Image (cartoon, helix red, strand yellow):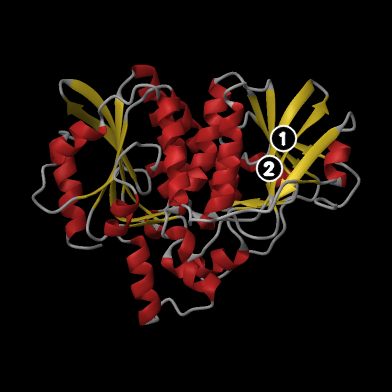
Amino acid sequence: MSATAPQLREALAEAIAFEPQGDPAGNLTLGRGRWEGGLLRVAFVDNRIASGSLGTVECQRLAALFSVASRERSAIVLYLDSAGARVSEGLKALGDFRALYRAGLDAMLGGTRIAVVLGRYCFGGASMLAHLAPRRLFQESTQLAMSGPSVIASASGVDPLDEMFRAMAQAALSPAARAQANPANSLWIPGDDVKAWIAHALAPVGDVPAALRARHDGLGTRLARGAASRPFEPVRRRDLEKIYPGGCEATESDGLILGQAQGGEGALALAGIVGKSPLDALRAWRFSDAVWRMADAPPARLEALLDCATHSPRLEDERIVLTEYIAGMAFALAALAARGTAIGLTVLGKAGGGVYVALAAPARRVASVYGADIQVLPGAAVAAILGESNDAAANFEDYSAAGVADEELKLGIIPGAT
């Protein structure tokens, strides 16, 4: 941990008069604070165990914190020094993080004010939690990304200790780069007034869905000029025809599926992420854009479809803060749900990590097609983090027990076949 890390943590604790409640649970310490005469709910996620990762205990207690704060209408301050979900705990950590992120989405859309202060690391799921807040406070050593440098290096076939790679990664993930990408990201210098930042960060947002829509529109301006996708073309998938025997019309463009179908409970809209290539910022933004467009005339039901194993581990995507694009998919779906649309998710093939959480957290029900493969992260990413991968195949009983899927669809065909 850098020399500035404890300074910011201590400055934050002093600014909000933090009082811990109960013993720490893994990396998590919960407590209360005071701000302008009101109660704050506070959570410190420290880098004590496994790079500050969030396991089942931390996720369950954080989810409870969001729920309590929502009922009390109290604000939340989070301090995050975390590499994300605890990969070593497998599917259970993924299922509990799904529940945690759902609680966070509900709190955010319910008007709970959230401020996030960052420690040294903020990767993966932790970076998605950080973006539940409208503003984030970085320190000089903070790195925020969906993928940490070791995962990016592994995916690129580069030695993570290579000096050129390290320089490129630092330039992409640095607080200065994050502040340049988004003015909602601020850099704390030792001696800065944390109280002044908190006052700004906890200011009422007003119309939360409108603010989220504006965030989404802003993300579109970050995409590379001239970035284009192939036109939508009709697509036939045997799995969708089996799931919706009453009729299904779908179109696909570069791994984004849009359409409509006739289900057992009537008509529903379809929006999906499919394909072997990892989810990049452009495809995530296009998915969110399609969902936001539905908000003007919300459908009664929307089924999200997923057959995409993971997010992009490329520096090109991290330079424009890939986390914001992935979290943006969850925000769009949650905002549509708040308008009355029943959101479901069907995992057609592969799913995992932040891509899965972004679509599963807003969904009331997650169905997995027989043979679907849901993982915390792909084996290569797990190996980059833990030094080894777990290739053991899971089945629906495992998914159900972990809370990553609620029902199984047996179609009698190979999942994902076209």
Q: CA distance from mark 1 to mark 2?
A: 7 Å
* Residue 377, horizontal then vertical, whole percent: 58, 57
User: Which residue is drawn at the image coordinates 31% and 58% (left, top)?
Assistant: 177
Residue 119 drawn above or below residue 30: below
Task: Name the residue type under label 1.
Answer: Leu
User: Which residue is drawn at the image coordinates 11% and 42% (left, top)?
Assistant: 193
User: Which residue is drawn at the image coordinates 43% and 76% (left, top)?
Assistant: 160
User: Which residue is drawn at the image coordinates 61% and 37% (left, top)?
Assistant: 290
Q: Quadrant of residue 112 in the image?
A: top left
Identify the residue under disc 1: 270
* Disc 1 crowd, CA 10 A, few/some/many (<14, 14-19, 20+): many
Contact between marks 1 and 2 (CB within 8 A): the answer is yes
Secondary structure, mark 1, is strand
Identify the residue under disc 2: 272
* Residue 127, horizontal then vertical, whole percent: 41, 49
Which quadrant would the N terminus be assigned to in this image? bottom left
* Residue 38, horizontal then vertical, whole percent: 20, 21
In this rendering, would 73 be left or right of 272? left
Q: Nearer the viewer, residue 10 or 337?
A: 337
In this rendering, would 54 be left or right of 356? left
Tell me if I can see residue 415 in this picture.
Answer: yes
Q: Nearer the viewer, residue 233 or 5?
A: 233
Task: Name the residue type under label 2.
Answer: Gly
